[in-house]
Image (cartoon, helix red, strand yellow):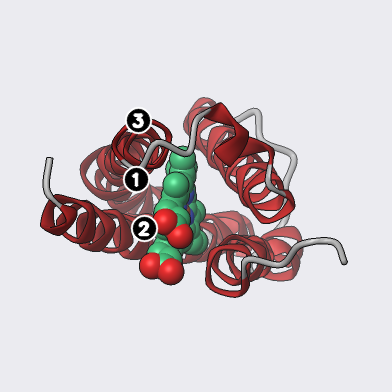
Amino acid sequence: MSFDTFNLVRGLHILAVIAWMAGMLFLPRLFAYDAEQAGRAEPLRSEMQTLLREWQRRLLKIIINPSMIAAWVFGVWLILIHVYTFGEGWAFLAQPWMATKLLAVTALSAWHGFLAGEFRRIGAGTSVRTGRFWRMTNEIPFLIAVIAVLSVTVEWRFG
Ligand code: HEM
């Protein structure tokens, strides 16, 4: 494997991450609009929720889930290039900046899982989340992304 492969995989990783982040930042907004239909009269309420839930489903299944898988596949590929091709060994993962990076991507994946669960609960009518909750938590993925990105660009270490 040449050095160019590393740069190609790095670029594909960043592209997958952009799509993942875009979806994760937009989905809670659709959840907020959905929750805020509660005050509307029928049949407008049902019509709006049917439309919003179709948009939620498409965003999750067509953008968010596949791009999360792609981000992980290219991310793990990058790890394997460091470990084997660059001969850094598994100690690569033990570097402090890589540890915070993995912590951040684990947190982002957990938030993704929570959103997917909420999508199912909203469809089943069992979600207890309000529009206010979704507006207040909307920036969580971005805050996690700050840690994920700065970990790899700064490569901070002790001492
Ligand atoms: C899904 C699991 C992920 C894994 C396993 C992973 C792993 C990695 C690895 C090993 C690198 C190469 C680091 C280097 O060679 O310096 C990298 C680069 C990068 N990652 Fe991730 N990553 C993941 C998710 C994310 C997420 C969620 C973001 C942003 C929100 C992100 C942003 C970046 C950026 C911007 C780079 C390029 C850094 C540079 O070229 O200096 N990654 N990732």
Contact? badges 2 and 1 (CB < 8 Å): yes
Name the amino acid, label 2.
Answer: Val
Q: Nearer the viewer, residue 154 or 16?
A: 154
Does residue 42 appear anywhere in the picture? no
Q: Quadrant of ligand 1?
A: bottom left
Distance of label 2 from label 3 (alpha carbons): 24 Å
Distance of label 2 from label 1 (alpha carbons): 6 Å
Question: Does dot 3 land on a helix, a strand or a loop?
Answer: helix
Q: Nearer the viewer, residue 43 or 49?
A: 49
Contact? badges 2 and 3 (CB < 8 Å): no
Q: Is residue 74 left or right of residue 98?
A: left
Mark 1 Cα-neighbour bin, 10 Å: few <14, some 14–19, many ≥20: many
Instruction: Identify the residue position indicated by label 2 in the image.
Output: 17
Which tag is nearer the camera, tag 1 or tag 3?
Answer: 3
Question: Does dot 2 land on a helix, a strand or a loop?
Answer: helix
Q: Residue 24 location in percent, x, y?
A: 47, 57
Q: Is residue 158 above or below residue 51?
A: below
Instruction: Identify the residue position indicated by label 3 in the image.
Output: 84
Mark 2 Cα-neighbour bin, 10 Å: few <14, some 14–19, many ≥20: many
Task: Confirm if mark 1 falls within 8 A of ligand 1.
Answer: yes
- Residue sitting at x 55%, y 28%: 90
Name the amino acid, label 1.
Answer: Ala
Instruction: Identify the residue position indicated by label 1 in the image.
Output: 71
